[in-house]
Structures are given as C-alpha cells and as structure tokens.
Image (tube, rainbow, N blue to C red):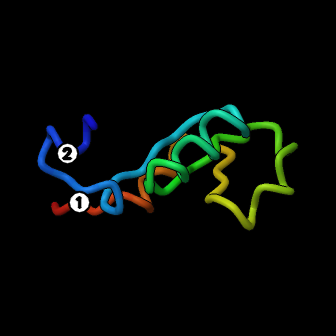
Amino acid sequence: MLSLACGIYPEEAIHVGHNSYSDVIGARNAGIKAVLYDQQGVFVEFADQCLLIRQLRGLLSLLPYSR
C-alpha cells in the first residue's frame, strides 16, 4: 500500500475523490478516511459515510499543518 511505503498508516491518511462509489467505498475498505468532493451538493446521502466538501479549500481544515 502506498501510504505504508510513505511511512503513514491508513488511519492517518485521507482519500479525496468525486466518485461516491469507488472513492468513498474504496477508501473505507482500505481503512482510509474518505472525503467526497461534492461541488453540486448532490451526495448528501453519503454524509454518514464520509466527510463531504463542496469546495477544495474545505480540505485545509482537515489537514494538520504548522505555520
């Protein structure tokens, strides 16, 4: 798994995608937190399965960083 090759564990990673099936379910099956980029707001039924963002800048609040 790529995340292990990079020195991080699946529970420390996030997967961002726009496909409700392959991105959300695939990430969850791999033990990775799924973030669904839902620009149009049409995937509200997935809100209990993953994090939903409507703009990419929403990712910033999910990523740890230091100034």
Residue 6: percent from left, percent from top: 14, 40
Q: Secondary structure at mark 1?
A: loop
Q: Secondary structure at mark 2?
A: helix
Residue 17: percent from left, percent from top: 57, 35
- C-alpha gap between disc 2 and disc 1: 20 Å
Q: Is 29 drawn above or below residue 19 in the view shown?
A: below
Q: Amino acid at mark 2?
A: Leu
Query: Which of marks 1 and 2 precedes in the sequence?
Result: 2
In this orientation, which residue lies closer to the viewer: 53 or 18? 18
Q: How many marks?
A: 2
Residue that appears at 69% across and 32% down:
19
Residue that appears at 44% across and 53% down:
32
- Judge the density around disc 1: few (<14), some (14-19), many (≥20) Cα neighbours within 10 Å: few
Q: Amino acid at mark 1?
A: Tyr
Residue that appears at 45% across and 48% down:
30
Residue 58: percent from left, percent from top: 54, 52
Residue 7: percent from left, percent from top: 12, 48
User: Residue tagged by mark 2?
Assistant: 4
User: Residue tagged by mark 1?
Assistant: 65
- Looking at the rendered image, the disc whose residue lies closer to the viewer, 2 or 1, is 2
Q: Which mark is residue 37?
A: none
